[in-house]
Image (cartoon, rainbow, N blue to C red):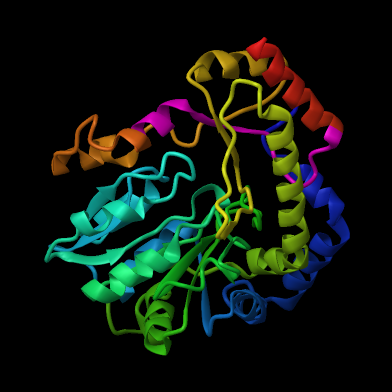
Amino acid sequence: MISLVDLTAQYHSIKEEIDSAVLSTLESGHFILGPQVVKFEESIAAYLGVKHAIGLASGTDALVLALRALNIGAGDEVIIPAYTFFATAGTVMSVGAKPVFVDVDPHSYQIDVSKIKSAITSKTKAIIPVHLYGHPAEMNPILEIVRENNLKVIEDNAQGLGAEYLGKKTGSFGDISCLSFFPTKNLGAFGDAGMVVTNDPALAERMRMLRTHGWKKKYYSEEVGYNSRLDALQAAILQAKFPYLDSWNEKRRELAHRYNEKLGSSGVVIPVEREWGKHVYHLYIVRSEKREALQAFLKQMGIASEVYYPLPPHLATPCRKFGYKEGDFPHAEKASSETFALPLYPELTLSQQDEVIAAVKSFAG
């Protein structure tokens, strides 16, 4: 069986570093925040070229804290792409605000910047571009719209760590940017983990408070916050993995380009990489009008695949109250009905990839 991702293979490739990091943390006695978390925060801040990084319990929490730090709440609107993981919309709703969806580019799956302005109202407070699948959103036009309309930008960089827009790392453009270290991410923990980054010291201080019950001083809550701290064990594991991130991303890119070369005439639509972006292929997404049959065929051949995501968020049950309906965002809906991921991870062998390629071609006949 060729799996979609093989986390065990990655662990064994750097087993000594991981085991050493875990043991040293266990022996330190520091399990909540502490030096391991600070070190990893500093590593990510330096990598992205930002001033502040705050480790959290998950990428979803990162979005919530970012919204809270920007005082977005009841009566406010936040513009998001109509094709994304539900958390992008769900977190907006969790702070009492309304997600306002914008359709996506049908090829890159990023928010269609030409449609953002028409979605802005007097209630709009922020835009959340999502660097979906590891392809960067088109940030300069978004930042121009933001400046013209006095809005904030929260980058959802959960899938894009290491990606670049015009040579600059995604996650370094927003007022606040959000990261996820879910185990399957390009840099993954051994459990849930996330982070927010910012250049604004006041926002950084607020988010540090929010992650620990609204404290500046221990036990003295100044507002209602959360218990959302990056575990020291996860930080140690992530720090051990961190030096490999760029080489792993480059391996993903090599494998993705090889897929592109071999699958160009196979009947599936291969992903694009815009000239202004560097894609890190968190997922290798293809599309087919015969998705269900093709996935069933691949499964018979011992090859895993997965749909990301089968339902665009505007059609999910929690969003029905906003009056969205089928047909509102045709590119997002078509993508949700046709796209799926093929196996891609740095440890995937060329022979395994050749099996996947042969199977897809065989289905096409």
Q: How many marks?
A: 0
The x, y position of residue 22, in whole percent, is: 76, 65
Q: Which residues are magenta?
A: 333-350
**Is 362 drawn above or below residue 109 in the view shown?**
above
Q: Does residue 1 sit above or below 285 in this rendering?
A: above
Let me know if residue 347 is in the magenta part.
yes
Quick check: 165 left or right of 10? left
Q: Position of residue 11 (x, y in %)?
A: 79, 51
Q: Nearer the viewer, residue 255 or 84?
A: 255
* Quarter of the rendering containing residue 125: bottom left
Q: Is residue 196 left or right of residue 348?
A: left
- In the depicted structure, whether residue 288 falls above or below residue 277: above
- In screen coordinates, is 17 left or right of 128? right
Answer above or below: position of 335 versus 235: above
Residue 192 position within the rendered picture, expressed as x and y whole percent measured from the top left: 55, 55
Camera-side residue of 10 and 256: 256
**Going 24% across and 41% down the picture, which residue do you hit?**
318
Q: Quadrant of the N terminus?
A: top right
Q: Looking at the image, which is closer to me, 264 or 13?
A: 264
Using the rendered image of the protein, determine whether residue 276 is visible from the camera's viewpoint. Answer: yes
- Measuring 39% from the left and 58% from the top, which residue is drawn there? 129
The image shows residue 236 at horizontal and vertical percentages of: 70, 69
Q: From where the camera sits, is residue 219 visible?
A: no
x 84%, y 49%: residue: 12
Reply yes or no: does residue 7 show up in magenta.
no
| Quadrant location of the C terminus in the rendered image | top right
Farthest top residue? 365
Q: Which residue appears at 20% of the width and 33% of the height?
A: 325
The reply, left or right, for residue 22 in relation to residue 39 is right
